[in-house]
Image (cartoon, rainbow, N blue to C red):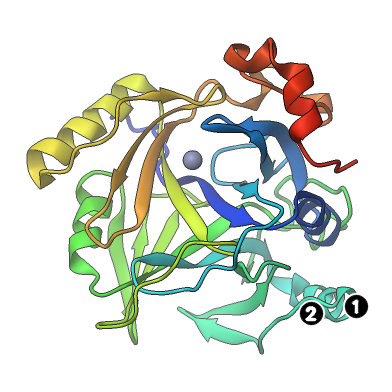
Amino acid sequence: MTATTKHGIHHVTAIAGPARRNLDFYTRVLGLRLVKKTVNFDDPGTYHFYFGDEAGSPGTILTFFPWEHAAPGRLGIGETQETVFRVPEGAMGYWTHRFVEKGVAYDALVRRFGEAVLSFRDPDGTRLALVGVPGIESEPAWTGEVPAEFAIRGFHSVNLLLKEAAPTGAILTDVLGFSEVGREGSLVRFKAGDTAIGGIVDIHEAGAFLPGRMGAGSVHHIAFRAADDAEELAMARKLAENHGLQTTEQRDRNYFRSVYFREPGHVLFEIATDIPGFAIDEPVASLGQSLKLPPVYESRRREIEQVLPEVA
Ligand code: ZN
């Protein structure tokens, strides 16, 4: 690993209900950019939406598999509890007002590790939050629907609901580039070096608790960053040698290349390369505007387009 390697969250992938409602919420209410409209490579009759910043930078990407008739999930142990975005410190009032105006379910503001946290849910019940971060007003922002002074600047963190923190913490620190940086109540915070965007994982140590059930509103997996294939391979080796955990074979996801493994706390983790990124099959200026298919499905485009629900 070189000194310039950035670690942290690459993307978060969740399960949604109806595609159009999902698209509306993330682009129109939260003001994220739709950076890629493609299909689930393992189930090409289903969309795969990627939302993020202008370029779909690692650490900003929330993706969804929307199923029109997905049954709701139930949060439990061994799952991601909350996905948290960064906004400028002074934006909390704006967002509270916006949630009232748009009918978004939200909770009273709380403080965690000294920061203001505004938790809310998307229409499928996906648990999300905004954290007010000082000094980020001048960071670039995608200003589709939300003015720059209030707009989301990528992920702050993910919060994992686990029986115990130590086994998962060992993977975060030994393999994925994190260090433990603090504890507060039942939370243990891990941080990836100086990565500002997507650099935090909080583990909520909950002890014995019901297991979750995947469905609409559940996070399917969390992907962590590797600079390139060589670093990804080195991380996979370390998982096997130091922790006895096997990853899948590397899968080509067109915009990054990935391996997957089930971490000891039961959350599905992925390691994804920063390269090649979302501009590989369309220019940054028009990201997300047309349906992109991996080469293997291009010959079936007409058939796939007919199966996918109308979202425009
Ligand atoms: Zn993924």
Please tell me whether mark 2 sits on a helix, a strand or a loop.
helix
- Nearest the viewer among 34 and 86 is 34
Q: Quadrant of the N terminus?
A: top left
For residue 239, side relative to residue 117 (left or right): left
Few, some or many C-alpha atoms within 10 Å of disc 2 (few <14, some 14-19, many ≥20)? some
- Nearest the viewer among 110 and 65 is 65
Please name the residue shown 18% across and 62% down the image. Answer: 167
Mark 2 and mark 1: span between their CA atoms?
9 Å
Relative image position of residue 119 (x, y in whole percent)? 63, 77
Please name the residue shown 86% across and 56% down the image. Answer: 28
For residue 89, side relative to residue 275 (left or right): right
- Nearest the viewer among 116 and 229 is 229
Q: Quadrant of the C terminus?
A: top right
Foreground: disc 2 or disc 1: 1
Amino acid type, mark 1 = Glu
Which residue is labeled 1 in the image?
101
Relative image position of residue 186 (x, y in whole percent)? 33, 83
Which residue is labeled 2 in the image?
96
Image quadrant in which you'd find residue 97: bottom right
Please name the residue shown 53% across and 68% down the image. Answer: 73
